[in-house]
Image (cartoon, rainbow, N blue to C red):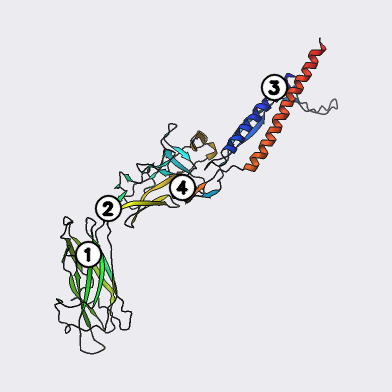
Amino acid sequence: MMMSMYSALSGLKSQQTKLNVISNNIANVNTAGYKSQTVGFADLLSQTIAGATGANDATGKGGTNAQQIGLGVSVSSITTNMTTGSSQYTGNDTDLMISGSGFFILQGGSTGEYQFSRAGNFGVDASGNLTLDGYKVCGWQDNSSGSYNTQTEVEPLNLFSDSYTGNKKVIAPSATSEATLTGNLDPSAEAHGTYPTTIDTTGLSADGTSTMTVVDTQGNSYDVKVNFYKVGVDGTGTDSATTTWKWELADASSALTVTGGEGYLTFDANGKIITSDTAYATNPSVTLAATGASAGSAPFTVALDFTGVSTYSGDDDSGVTATANGYESGELQSYSMGSDGIITGTYSNGKQQTLGQIALAVFNNASGLEKIGNNLYATTANSGDYTGGVVAGTHGSGALSSGTLEMSNVDLASQLSEMMITQRAYQANSKIITTSDTILQEIINMVR
């Protein structure tokens, strides 16, 4: 009689454990990246009343099975379901979802050097650290070779500065080094001289003009005009007619001194620039130096490219456009995250640069990881060791989706059904105890 009570008691304990797991699953139905758990049961050792016997040909008796009474049930496993949860769009650039089996790598806890998480609701603290609930998100920041060395040890990511590139909150200025001019000069313009005589443009109105913005070494910008003057046309014949134009750089603000800021271009009878004319370079260089309040800037040289200029007859005479490189300094305004984990910053000057690359971890047995709270996991003897970060999208880790979060993979309908089944199982086990107690009471009454 006592055996039935103890068996039922083990059933109560086991079903209570399952109910605890179910309640935790339901409690975390809206927890980002949460992985549901399931409980497995196994019967306990059985008491053998009579052993099994084989058939006996001498007596003609057949074999008999063993007679055993089970001693109850125990919890054999609590398994974490590592399937990917559904995605939820948030629109937040620092929210990330992993599509595969990877984990974010975090640093800052006391359980071990690294912790791991599926939740991607990141933030940035006042120091620029990319964080998850105070834990620092890890990846790679050494971009000295033009790309991140993903074979090195991961480290906490900082969007504002690092030991490799220094201050990333401000992007340094870049002086103008080249400018490209494209467009069509008006072929009907009146010539100011006779080919190939050079001309003095003092007092002349330009037959074409273009403005380009250049930047010095300190990030100061200046508007510089490129003026064009038609010199003359070779009169040796229509088919062989050659036109010469003069170009000059002019700074109306007088904030720059220009060295080598003039030259000549020649065009064939069809209005195409003659790049083989050794007398007139189509790719000259000019040197500019600041003379005003930013005068401490070093002189900088700009290579001009005139090969895209023409004087085609009947073509669009809208003029010549000049485009120069170089930019002023800028402050970090926003950042975005790519599917490979690369974080790109956008600055107030319109420029972009990478700020780091988020790394992911993969495990031989992710279900073997230990939950340590705060959506974090730690490695165990059965999960496999963490051996270094991998690039998102490789080794089965899964690509990253920005602006979305992985939701809990708890199936609420299934959990409610399991809860009702567990409730009935608990009631049935408790009924065994009350029934056994009633029988014991009858036995005690018999001896009164």
The disc placed on residue 95 is 4
Q: Nearer the viewer, mark 3 or mark 2?
A: 2
The three-letter amino acid code for the residue at tag 2 is Ala
Q: How many marks?
A: 4
In contact (CB < 8 Å): disc 3 and disc 1: no
Q: CA distance from mark 4 to mark 2?
A: 28 Å
Tell me which numbered mark, 3 or 2, is placed earlier along the sequence.
3
- Reading the image, the residue beneath label 2 is 172
Residue in the foreground of this view, choosing between 168 and 80:
168
> Distance between the Cα atoms at labels 2 and 1?
19 Å
Q: Classify 107 as above or below 194.
A: above
- Tell me which numbered mark, 2 or 1, is placed earlier along the sequence: 2
What's the CA distance linking mark 1 and mark 4?
Answer: 43 Å
Quarter of the image containing the C terminus?
Answer: top right
Q: Which residue is mark 1?
A: 302
Q: In the rendered image, is residue 19 in sight?
A: yes
Q: Crowding at label 2, few (<14), some or many (≥20) Cα neighbours within 10 Å? A: some
Which mark is in front, 4 or 3?
A: 4
| Mark number, residue 79 | none
**Residue 24 lies in what quarter of the image?**
top right
Q: Position of residue 16 (x, y in %)?
A: 64, 29
Decide which of tag 4 and tag 3 comes sooner along the chain: 3
- The residue labelled by disc 3 is 6
Which is more N-terminal, label 2 or label 4? 4
Q: Quadrant of residue 14?
A: top right
